[in-house]
Every structure is written in structure tokens, then in C-alpha cells.
Image (tube, grey):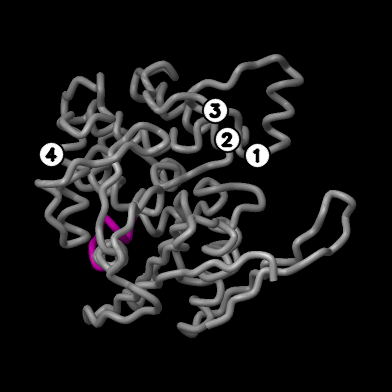
Amino acid sequence: MESHHEVDVAIIGADGHRSGFGKPQRWTLARSSMKPIQAFPLVATGAADAFDLEQRHLALSCASHNGEPWHVDTVTTWLHRLGFGADTLECGAHLPLHEASTHALVHDEIAPDPRHNNCSGKHAGFLTVCRHLGINPAGYLHPEHPVQAHHVTKATEAACGVDLSDQVPVVDGCGIPVWSMPLANLAQGWATLATTDEGRRLFAAMQAEPFLVAGTGRMCTRIMEASSGLVVKTGAEGVFSGAHVESGLAWSLKARDGATRAAEAAVLWLMRDLGFAVDVELGPVRNHAGLDVGAVRVVA
């Protein structure tokens, strides 16, 4: 055995019953597994309806996308609908997470811009709320900005059952505030969304457009394409959350060392342990010569 990863798991039932593995109360930075909760104001304020957003837009508002052409084109047309250009996005630019899309940009000598950022859909959602409520979008990623302080942070507190008033957030890769909370409270946030019209609308969009939530080969997309009634969202540093919408059962997990491969293996094991059929396999560890050289296994 080359590496050993420890994973904490929190499970919240529809009746509020809490269980899990390891230390479900371990404090955690939720990272991108918080995105559906951060997108809640997009629906709750009426902004989504005001700009006739479709399920593809709502799915992108919850996404950590690959920067493939469909992702970028959808963000582009969304921004045009708002009267904004790519330069209004404050998430910064990086090459697409999808290797072929990166090669295409390099071949065409096109530099990536903020639309290619995996978080650009979430940021387009923030801009939509700003436009709908007449809020100046400049600096929208700062915790003191009205869209964060009065809407996103409040939605986080309400869904997750936490008080963030005395906490100083850290900064995510795309620049927005990241709050720390017990893993069980992150799972509670997902369970809360499953009980609200706004949350169910976001979850329905994720289920309807799983490719836009992540993309080619990505675990979030693969799980939602291969299962019924499940919504999932990964986050950086080994976080993975999900819910079964009909039953209201929700979960969040965190690989203590931040390993994505551990989080992916754990979430597949967990969903099956909870009784859900998910036709997805991790597959072998394969080297660049095409040889199967190992495997990732869960020991529970």
C-alpha cells in the first residue's frame, strides 16, 4: 500500500437524525461543495426568473466546470443577457480543466479569460443577483459586498444552521469567501435545500444538466448521469457533498489530507452503503504506458 487517506463523513436524515463515520463534527472549509447553497439567492431573490434563466444556467451556477466549449459558450450568452462582458467576472482566468479544450486554445493561440475559470457560472449567478437588485457589482467577491453579506452569507447561515458573524472567512481559489463549519452542518445545508422549492429547483437543474456541473470524465457528472434522484458536488481539498432529493437524505465528507481520489472513492462507497444504485466504477490506476498498475480501495 503506497498511500493511506482518512475520511470523515456526516449523514443527515430528512428527520434531522445525524450519523456518520470518523469525526462528523470536524470543522471543514466547504469549498465548491457549497455552490448549490451559494446559488440559493439566485432563485430566492427572483433574479433567475427576471432574466429567464433556464436549467442550463442554474446548473452552471452550481458548477465547477471543465471550461469545455459548451460551458464557456453558455456563460458567454448568459453574460450578454445581463449586459456584461467577460471582464466583469472577478474570478480570474485559468486554462480549462479539460485537457483537449486547453490544447485547442493553445493551438489557436487564444489566452484563457475568466469565462474559462471553473467557477465562472457561480460568478455569473452573483452578477445576476446584482443586476436584478440594482447592486453595483464591483467587488462582488468581497465578504462585505451586499451580494455576499446580505444574500450568500445569509443563505449559508440559514441552510447550514451556523452563525458566521464572528468568523473571518478565508479566500477560495476564485476569490469568494470560504466559511468554516462542522462537516455535519455542511450536510445539513444540503438536506435543507432538498426541503425548499428553491433548492429543489437548483437540484433539478443539476440532475437535468449534469455535464454543465462538471464535464467530460468528471465524477460529479458521471454519478448524476448514472443514478436516479441523486445530486452531488465535489469541492477542492477532498470535500464531496450530495443528497437524495426525494428522501431528503444528505451527506458531506472530507478527506483529511485533501486527496480528491480519496473523496471520490469514499462517496461512491457511501452512496452504495446508503442503498443507492450508482453504476460508476473508479477504474484502475493506469500509467502513461497504458498499464494497470494499482487500485484505490475503501476499507471501512
Label 2 Cα crowd, 10 Å radius (few <14 / some 14-19 / many 20+): many
Label 1 Cα crowd, 10 Å radius (few <14 / some 14-19 / many 20+): some
Q: Is residue 289 above or below residue 151?
A: below
Q: Are marks 3 and 4 in contact (CB under 8 Å)?
A: no
Q: Residue 147's spot in the image, x, y percent? A: 20, 34
Whichever of callouts 4 and 2 sits on the residue coming sooner in the sequence is: 2
Instruction: Residue type at mark 2: give it.
Output: Gly
SS for dot 2: loop
Q: Which mark is residue 94?
A: 3
Looking at the rendered structure, the number of numbered marks drawn on it comes to 4
Q: Are marks 3 and 2 in contact (CB under 8 Å)?
A: no
Residue of label 4: 150
Residue of label 2: 67
Whichever of callouts 3 and 4 sits on the residue coming sooner in the sequence is: 3
Q: Residue 248's spot in the image, x, y percent? A: 32, 74
Magenta span: 195-201
